[in-house]
Image (cartoon, rainbow, N blue to C red):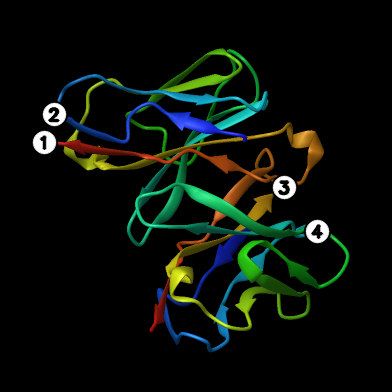
Amino acid sequence: DVKVTQSSRYLVKRTGEKVFLECVQDMDHENMFWYRQDPGLGLRLIYFSYDVKMKEKGDIPEGYSVSREKKERFSLILESASTNQTSMYLCASSRTSGSRDGELFFGEGSRLTVL
Amino acid sequence: AQSVAQPEDQVNVAEGNPLTVKCTYSVSGNPYLFWYVQYPNRGLQFLLKYITGDNLVKGSYGFEAEFNKSQTSFHLKKPSALVSDSALYFCAVRDWGRDDKIIFGKGTRLHILP
């Protein structure tokens, strides 16, 4: 069974802390994505990666960075967490864009609360 | 720019009745359209997609969607709703102009009333 695994389902952090959200996929997918989900706003793309050591900014990259040292792992980093980063974070992966069909496989989500 | 709109924040349907969740899209090229479902405290799950071919697309859990090019719509449907269909539904479109990323609508919460 194919899987995208997010390391933490629930996190509570304090303002100013550095936060790491880890995502691992076992489908040998080239593409990986980080979204945040907020009520009434749907899913917004933070960063994505089409290859190892490659990263591209999405729609809302401010306050975030990412790391992709291995094909299966895509990490989202909040350098200094702020209360407005309290949200549900969703990781997703897909096959190469050359396939053009675009089905995304999502992890279960990481609900982050910043106090 | 490509976009997708879900005009209803919430849809209520009695169990056993047919359901429709609406989606309209705007794309500059051929539309690749998707529906995803999210159950409480879970990630999104793929339901179905339209790439080309028949306008009626069948997907998981008895859902289907009708692609209508003239109305630029891709409504999700099911002939007979189940209480377990209660969830958050997202329509999405591939954005050809932006690295082929998937653009999501804001979601429609579906309540199936027993």
Q: Left or right: where does residue B75 sit relative to residue A110? A: right
Does mark 1 fall on the same chain as mark 4?
no
Residue B3: horizontal and vertical position, in percent? 59, 60
The amino acid on which the numbered mark 1 sits, given as a three-letter code, is Leu
Quadrant position of the N terminus of chain B in the picture: bottom right
Which residue reaches farthest top? A69
Q: Which residue is mark 2?
A: A15
| Relative to B56, residue A96 above or below | above
Q: Chain of mark 2?
A: A
Q: Nearer the viewer, mark 1 or mark 3?
A: 1
Q: Left or right: where does residue B31 sit relative to residue B21? A: right
Mark number, residue A38: none
Task: Please report the residue visible at 69 percent of the width from the left and 63 percent of the height from the top.
Answer: B59
Asked whether disc 2 touches disc 1, contact meaning CB atoms under 8 Å apart, the reply is yes
Q: Chain of mark 4?
A: B
Q: CA distance from mark 3 to mark 4?
A: 9 Å
In primary-sequence order, the first of circles 3 and 4 is 4
Q: Residues within 10 Å of mark 2 (few under 14, many from 20)?
A: some
- Element class at badge 1: loop
Q: Which residue is mark 4?
A: B30
Q: CA distance from mark 3 to mark 2?
A: 38 Å
Q: Which residue is mark 1?
A: A115
Q: CA distance from mark 2 to mark 1?
A: 6 Å
The amino acid on which the numbered mark 3 sits, given as a three-letter code, is Trp
Q: Quadrant of residue B9?
A: bottom left
Does mark 2 fall on the same chain as mark 4?
no
Asked whether disc 3 touches disc 4, contact meaning CB atoms under 8 Å apart, the reply is no
The amino acid on which the numbered mark 4 sits, given as a three-letter code, is Asn
In primary-sequence order, the first of circles 2 and 1 is 2
Residue B57: horizontal and vertical position, in percent? 76, 68
